[in-house]
Amino acid sequence: MRKRIMILILFFGVASLTFFASTDVISLFAGQHSFINISGEGNQIDCVACHHHIADELNHSMIHADLSCEACHRFNGTTDITFASGDRSHSIPGKEAHAAYTPRCLDCHGGNGVWIENKTGSSVHAPPARAFGEGEHYGSNYSAHKTLVLKANASNTSIGENEACLVCHTNYSCKISYSYFYNIDYNISNWNISSFSFNGTRNYDIQWNKSGAKHEFLKLSDIKCTKCHKNIYDALVNGTSNPSNENYLTHAPIEIDNTGSSKNWDTDNPWGHYRYHYIPDANRTEWVNNSYCFRCHNVNKYASEHSSENATYDLGNVTEDTNSTEVHCAEALTCASCHGSGRTKEVIDNPDGPGGDGGGGGGGDEKKGHSGTTPDFVDEVASNYARTFNGDICMGCHEAAVHPDGGGGQCSSCHKYGNAVVNIESEPSGYATNT
Amino acid sequence: MKRMIMLAIALLAISIFVLPVTLSLFSGQHCWYNLTAGGNQVPCEKCHADVAEEMNALAGPHTGETGLGRLKCSYCHRLPPIWRRNTTFENYTYASGDGTGSQPGVESHAASTIPCMYCHSGDKSGVTPTHDLNFYCWSCHQAPNQNPNYRPAHEGRYTNSEDCRRCHGNAHTGDVYYIPPAGGFSLTTNATDTGSRAAHKTFVMNAISNPDMEDANEACIGCHTKIRVESNFNVTSSLMISVNDSYNLSASYWNVVNISPDGYITYKEVKEG
């Protein structure tokens, strides 16, 4: 005890002497007079010192990982921003920005793109964001995501259109709440539609959970269409179960399947090729992917990436029928874009139809279906009905589940005379009745 | 033992008797600094050795990168009147000890903590034309018509070229230059300084409203010095997008009606000093 008291007395004595003898004032913010020399070329203030997290994201990024902070955030190639620069004698005071700015992605990816220097001193090209980088109108109206870009530009979460860019091209997560019609009803009589109505509202929510990192840019192949359009994926893969026939699968005519119970449908199409839209049941989960989406929604891209199919399906000419060269990633189109009158894949006689060479029986014009109708049935649908209904009008007949199983019934009623009463639900259920 | 005690008492008594001075508690307190000469004769470093040490450790802005020595404490902490400045920053009157012309301080006595922007908010930058670093500055700049405000430069605070050169000269290049404005935040007097695209503008604006330091100093020193900085970031990580199919019988389009932040990630960044 006595020893402890002595130590305490000694401690206080030393502390008192220290305070007494000390003439220094202790600064509140140590280091504030250690000024960083910025007189050299380039930027000497270490962005990463305060932004490790972003640097780490960028290091894991599939794109832009070779770029310095300054390459994007002190870019003035198209912006005319004057940044502050510290070369002592020739220093430049900033005008629009001091150390850095928050860039619009289109600052580099607009117009024809730009050349910028990467970390190793090489000049690399920032490719143009096709369509969206073309002036203030973001290119053609055929781009499926143009309204997303327009709204992004009008919103305040990020600068410019960046929300739209980031949500697809980075690990920025998203939730999307869709609202659209629940079903449509229509009658067909002699290939004329009557009594068309749209009914109800379907609300469909998706959530694409990613890491949330806006500086982790994705490979283009990792941008999954089906993540944001899960209702379409479900419509193509799951639909509505139908224990007595094909499942109700909608959005693309994937109906014909040689595993069907009648066993008399092969897998080729009227042009004699393997069906373009067809995916075998066992492969749907995997094969409904970006590539499948691009078959219709970006024919140009699909053709350029699949030379064999390009030749088989005459996709060069199909591309001419579409506007796929004028879109960013996906085209908003209708069946008529490829299958309307005068198009490369305009509707032709179906050799497998009743009365056709396929031996379906029935004879006469039943094999023709609506090929050669005047005016063209497909064009009439496209002209008279909103784009959003077009696919479902077609799917009302071209969905496998609505075809009577086993080939019984009156073929000519539909195939020759074009009579049907149809109800079909929107994606993802696709449930339909066709009587 | 008793003899020893008696001897000690006797010695103590004699010592006190013969000792002609009183022991002061604080030695040196009567050694007054002579303040009558121009400038500052009170050594700031006596109390602020840690600051002096920082200033001497690096050759950067204010600390001798120009080859002309580091700035004196008084350049910043006893601010001279500067014509080319954003006038929202006040001039202070400090106490000055010149014997016959002494002035009492008004807003400040010996020193003040100052906004970085006091000196860095002008509208001129770069190398000044027609100047030679070795010229005697005061010979011209004492004349009112040699200065933009028709007053002696810095109201005559500095007549020694060494003082002028430490702020305005570069021994490596031989240049004389204007104090560089910190443009890009719309805080300088230059009309083209809009700061309209500045990424750190909210940082600077919040620093201005923060009372810990003068003006935007927290932001300035956060980047431009080796001070330790801890930042708590709260950034959006997810978007909520509402899309309505807008349609009638014959026309439709997908209408993106709302885009808003939906999720955040928080993290701490530490810039070590």
Image: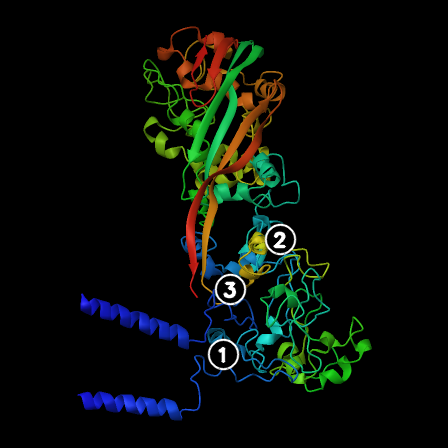
Residue in the picture at 52% in, 8% down? A419
* Residue at which label 1 appears: B46
Q: Mark 2 falls within which chain?
A: B
- Whole-number angstrom distance, CA of label 3 to CA of label 1: 52 Å
Q: Are marks 1 and 2 in contact (CB under 8 Å)?
A: no
The mark total stands at 3
Residue in the picture at 38% in, 25% down? A267
Lateral position of residue A286 relative to residue B224, left or right:
left
* Residue at which label 3 appears: A122
Looking at the rendered structure, the secondary structure element under dot 3 is: loop
- Label 1 environment density (alpha carbons within 10 Å; few <14, some 14–19, many ≥20): few
Q: Position of residue B194 (x, y in %)?
A: 68, 55
Quarter of the image where one finds residue B185? bottom right
- Whole-number angstrom distance, CA of label 1 to CA of label 2: 44 Å
Quarter of the image where one finds residue A95? bottom right
| Residue sitting nearer the eye, B53 or A246 | B53
Say which mark, if any, is on residue B197.
2
Looking at the rendered structure, the secondary structure element under dot 1 is: helix
Up the image or down, A279 lies above or below B130; here it is above
* Kind of residue indicated by mark 3: Ser
Q: Mark 1 falls within which chain?
A: B
Lateral position of residue A111 relative to residue A296, left or right:
right
Q: Position of residue A360 (x, y in %)?
A: 41, 13
Q: Is residue A66 visible?
A: no
| Residue sitting nearer the eye, B32 or A316 | B32
Numbered disc in front, either 1 or 2:
1
Lateral position of residue A419 relative to residue B114, left or right:
left
